[in-house]
Image: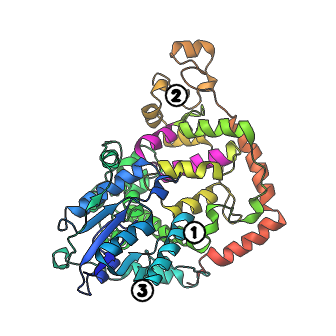
């Protein structure tokens, strides 16, 4: 029996799914296969929260198709496909292109060679509006609009000739781990995605534009679709077309415009990564490779404090602990965490990039690396933004609601001490039952001094000849012409 194999990778849905639609047209039985790859389990970008989300997504898929139509394994990719081919014979392989890490790119090359040797046609489809190996953004915006407004690749699941032969070949230990329940994390799956999507456009999103910068309000009023987009429980096209259907909703215009702009830059940053994927390892602007950074024991100690939310700067620590416990944080606070790491602590961005990936439930390689380098000020083309975490706390969490949620040891502190606890005298520490250095850490850096030092260094570095030359190259390759 020859089968058409659909490899969903990071596109864990069944509607608007081009590979699944095309695989169903030939008449061959269709089998979905998902592989929990040991290579990715060992990758520091990922953590258990990601694989639980994937598992929940797979359970949702299984609930909508015949038993045996989904095959789940955990082994080296080539071995997984070889076993399937020997058992059932693969007629053709279908998937989306993956704009992923270097290790998944190398894996895909190996699978391509494996398919060629066996005469198996592997058809890959573009992901969103991202164009593989693109070297210029000429007309890219027009292309984005065409893709996002085109018809969705939907299909009737009941009319597919499913190959009901798959099984779940996972160890009991792994299944138990994947089934662990954590109520603080969003639940994966296409069904849950559309509930979240509907709730945003029906009510939650009305205050989007006024809430997206607040670490507390954003939890409720932001779309909360980022994890579902990152793991393909929904396509960007589906979200954009839903947005357009609500475009004239009364009293929503400002929020819809703000949300639309976020959807527009989604593919823009992934396209940057696709066009220059070495940014996983190097500064996109080579002129910043020699930027002076803290190293040695001092770097290790500062990095550990940042990773664990023990820096003594309440807004920074609350944001990191929130991420560790929920996998979610709004955009502004994410930018602040990167700024604090690279500007105030003067650490190399590469020291923290994998940690944040591992705690972001919505880790998307292209967006992650493009944004990380931009916020770290190593592109040479973006405005240098050095976030002051004290100011961010005072403006975005004036009553300390967010800080006290994640730093309960500061619950008794009044303003302004929950933003600047180091300003308390010993008597005040005794009065409010908080001993600095014991109950809560002393600040590991003086924000005023670190701000001035970072500002001086970065503006000086941006004027260096190599940085300027690289900036021109980057602008030519990655910036969208105004006429497109």
Label at residue 36: none
Quadrant of the rendered image containing residue 424: top right
- Along the line of sight, the residue nearer the viewer: 277 or 80: 80
Taking the spot 75% from the left edge, 59% from the top edge, the residue there is 288
Residue 281 higher or lower than 139, as above or below: above
Q: Identify residue for label 3.
A: 119
Residues at circles 1 and 3 in contact by the CB criterion of under 8 Å? no
Label at residue 415: 2
Q: Say what secondary structure mark 1 lies in.
A: helix
Residue mark closest to the camera, 2 vs 3 = 3
Whole-percent x, y for residue 324 in the image: 46, 41
Q: Identify residue for label 1.
A: 273
Circle nearer the N terminus (2, 3): 3
Circle nearer the N terminus (2, 1): 1
Q: CA distance from mark 1 to mark 3?
A: 31 Å
Magenta segment includes 433:
no
Q: Which residues are magenta?
A: 318-342
Whole-percent x, y for residue 307 in the image: 56, 40
Q: Quadrant of the C terminus?
A: bottom right
Circle nearer the N terminus (1, 3): 3
Quick check: 482 left or right of 26? right
Residues at circles 2 and 3 in contact by the CB criterion of under 8 Å? no
Quick check: 138 left or right of 253? right
- Along the line of sight, the residue nearer the viewer: 378 or 207: 378
């Amino acid at each position: 029996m020859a089968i058409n194999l659909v490899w969903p990778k990071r596109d864990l849905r069944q509607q608007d799914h081009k590979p699944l639609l095309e695989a169903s047209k030939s008449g061959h039985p269709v089998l979905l296969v998902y592989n929990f790859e040991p290579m990715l389990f060992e990758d520091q970008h990922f953590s258990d929260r990601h694989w639980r989300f994937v598992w929940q997504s797979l359970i949702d898929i299984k609930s909508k198709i015949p038993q045996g139509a989904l095959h789940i394994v955990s082994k080296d990719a080539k071995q997984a496909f070889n076993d399937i081919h020997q058992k059932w014979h693969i007629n053709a392989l279908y998937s989306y292109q993956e704009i992923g890490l270097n290790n998944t790119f190398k894996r895909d090359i190996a699978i391509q060679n494996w398919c060629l040797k066996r005469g198996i046609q592997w058809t890959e489809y573009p992901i969103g509006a991202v164009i593989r190996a693109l070297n210029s953004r000429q007309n890219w915006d027009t292309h984005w609009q065409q893709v996002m407004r085109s018809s969705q690749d939907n299909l009737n699941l009941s009319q597919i000739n499913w190959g009901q032969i798959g099984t779940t070949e996972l160890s009991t230990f792994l299944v138990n781990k994947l089934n662990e329940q954590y109520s603080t994390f969003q639940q994966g799956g296409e069904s849950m995605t559309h509930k979240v999507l509907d709730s945003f456009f029906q009510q939650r999103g009305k205050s989007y534009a006024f809430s997206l910068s607040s670490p507390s309000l954003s939890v409720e009023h932001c779309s909360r679709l980022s994890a579902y987009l990152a793991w393909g429980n929904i396509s960007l096209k589906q979200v954009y077309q839903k947005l357009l259907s609500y475009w004239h909703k009364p009293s929503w215009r400002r929020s819809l415009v703000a949300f639309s702009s976020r959807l527009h830059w989604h593919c823009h940053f992934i396209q940057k990564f696709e066009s220059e994927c070495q940014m996983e390892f190097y500064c996109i602007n080579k002129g910043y490779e020699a930027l002076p950074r803290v190293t040695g024991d001092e770097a290790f100690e500062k990095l550990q404090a940042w990773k664990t939310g023990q820096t003594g700067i309440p807004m920074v620590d609350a944001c990191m602990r929130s991420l560790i416990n929920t996998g979610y944080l709004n955009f502004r606070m994410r930018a602040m965490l990167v700024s604090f790491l690279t500007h105030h602590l003067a650490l190399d961005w590469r020291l923290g990039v994998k940690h944040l990936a591992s705690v972001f439930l919505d880790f998307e390689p292209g967006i992650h690396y493009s944004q990380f380098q931009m916020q770290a000020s190593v592109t040479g083309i973006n405005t240098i933004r050095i976030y002051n975490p004290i100011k961010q706390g005072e403006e975005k969490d004036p009553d300390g609601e967010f800080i006290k949620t994640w730093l309960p040891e500061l619950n008794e502190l009044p303003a302004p001490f929950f933003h600047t606890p180091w300003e308390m005298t010993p008597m005040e520490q005794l009065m409010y039952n908080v001993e600095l250095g014991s109950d809560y850490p002393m600040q590991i850096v003086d924000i005023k001094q670190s701000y001035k030092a970072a500002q001086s260094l970065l503006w000086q570095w941006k004027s260096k000849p190599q940085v300027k030359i690289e900036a021109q190259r980057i602008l030519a390759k990655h910036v969208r012409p105004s006429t497109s």
